[in-house]
């Protein structure tokens, strides 16, 4: 879960897929039978973040299951951290992870491989633009390993400003299909069961309270 849109360099803000087994991810990303997530209007959700997160504009990482909230409190808690609570102003619906996965590559095709590679370049652990572009080309050709590698990288870095053009196109595509959030594939199973990413906090959320961790 990410605490701020512009996280300090010395602050751990997101957990990836450390220890996640290859087959588990592949199964999630290819299972058309899996369901998405639906959260009803009025439901309470939570974020573990720094002071100031009462401002609810933009994309928001969140959790709605008590056990997931507890995991985030343990992993991300510390000095100056709070549990922020929000009430949903509308029904939130996510696709399943197969649709999320496929929608990314449709977005890559729409935006263009070179532009997507450029947005990933400065933040990616794939060391060069050439390397990223090569992986995206292989992914578009149907190579499942390259698909998982590039999708996971996109999800890991979704908070980064460099990804804004691609993220906007991706969210717009899914919004047209009736979705207003996605499953946070980076954190799912690595530390929590059903973390979500809400497209538009201003539209979907109403801030209700905050509680300082450790009190």
Image: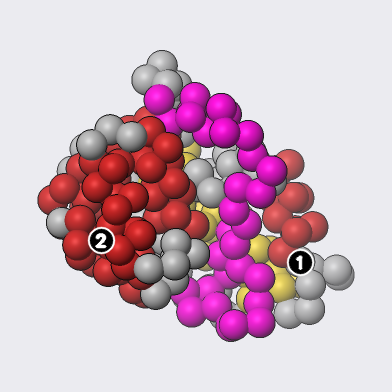
Looking at the image, tell me whether mark 1 or mark 2 is earlier in sequence order.
1
Give the side of residue 135 with respect to residue 187, left or right. left
Q: Is residue 161 above or below residue 204?
A: below
Say which of 176 and 205 sits in front: 176
| 204 relative position to 103: left or right | right
Image quadrant where one finds the C terminus: bottom right
User: Who is closer to the viewer here, 165 or 77?
Assistant: 165
Image spot of residue 211 (x, y percent): 73, 68
Residue 174 appears in the figure: no
Q: Main secondary structure of the magenta part?
A: loop
Q: Is residue 116 visible?
A: yes
Residue 72: quarter of image:
bottom right
Residue drawn at (71%, 73%), measured in percent from left and top?
Answer: 81
Q: Position of residue 15 (x, y in %)?
A: 62, 57
Query: Splitting the image into 4 quarters, where does residue 78 fall?
Result: bottom right
Q: Residues within 10 Å of mark 1 (few under 14, many from 20)?
A: some
Mark in front: 1 vs 2: 2
Q: Measure the C-alpha gap from mark 1 to mark 2.
A: 33 Å
Q: Quadrant of residue 56?
A: bottom left
Label of residue 116 in the image: 2
Find residue 123 and name its label.
none
| Residue appearing at x 66%, y 49% in the figure | 18
Dot 1 and dot 2 residues touching (CB under 8 Å): no
In the rendering, at what x and y percent does residue 10 appear? Answer: 66, 82
Helix, strand or loop status at disc 1: loop
In the image, residue 71 sits, relative to residue 76, either above or below, namely above
The residue located at (69%, 43%) in the rendering is 19
Q: Which residue is mark 1?
A: 77
Region of the chain picked out in magenta, as a range: 1-30
Q: Is residue 152 located in the magenta-colored stretch of the structure?
A: no
Instruction: Tell me the quadrant of the picture where the N terminus can be found.
Output: bottom right
Vertical placement of 132 versus 21: above or below?
Answer: below
């Amino acid at each position: 879960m990410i605490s701020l849109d512009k996280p300090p360099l010395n602050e751990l803000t997101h957990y990836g897929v450390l220890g996640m087994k290859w087959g588990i991810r592949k199964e999630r990303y290819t299972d058309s039978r899996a369901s998405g997530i639906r959260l009803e209007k009025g439901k309470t959700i939570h974020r573990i973040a720094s002071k100031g997160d009462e401002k609810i504009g933009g994309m928001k990482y969140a959790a709605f299951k008590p056990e997931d909230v507890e995991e985030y409190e343990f992993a991300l808690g510390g000095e100056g951290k709070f549990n922020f609570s929000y009430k949903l102003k509308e029904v939130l619906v996510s696709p399943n992870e197969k649709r999320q996965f496929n929608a990314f590559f449709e977005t890559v095709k729409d935006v263009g491989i070179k532009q997507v590679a450029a947005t990933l370049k400065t933040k990616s652990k794939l060391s060069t633009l050439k390397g990223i572009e090569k992986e995206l080309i292989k992914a578009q050709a149907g190579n499942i390993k390259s698909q998982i590698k590039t999708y996971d990288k996109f999800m890991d870095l979704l908070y980064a400003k460099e990804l804004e053009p691609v993220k906007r196109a991706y969210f717009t595509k899914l919004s047209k299909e009736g979705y207003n959030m996605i499953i946070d594939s980076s954190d799912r199973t690595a530390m929590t069961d059903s973390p979500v990413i809400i497209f538009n906090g201003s539209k979907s959320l109403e801030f209700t309270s905050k509680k300082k961790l450790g009190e």
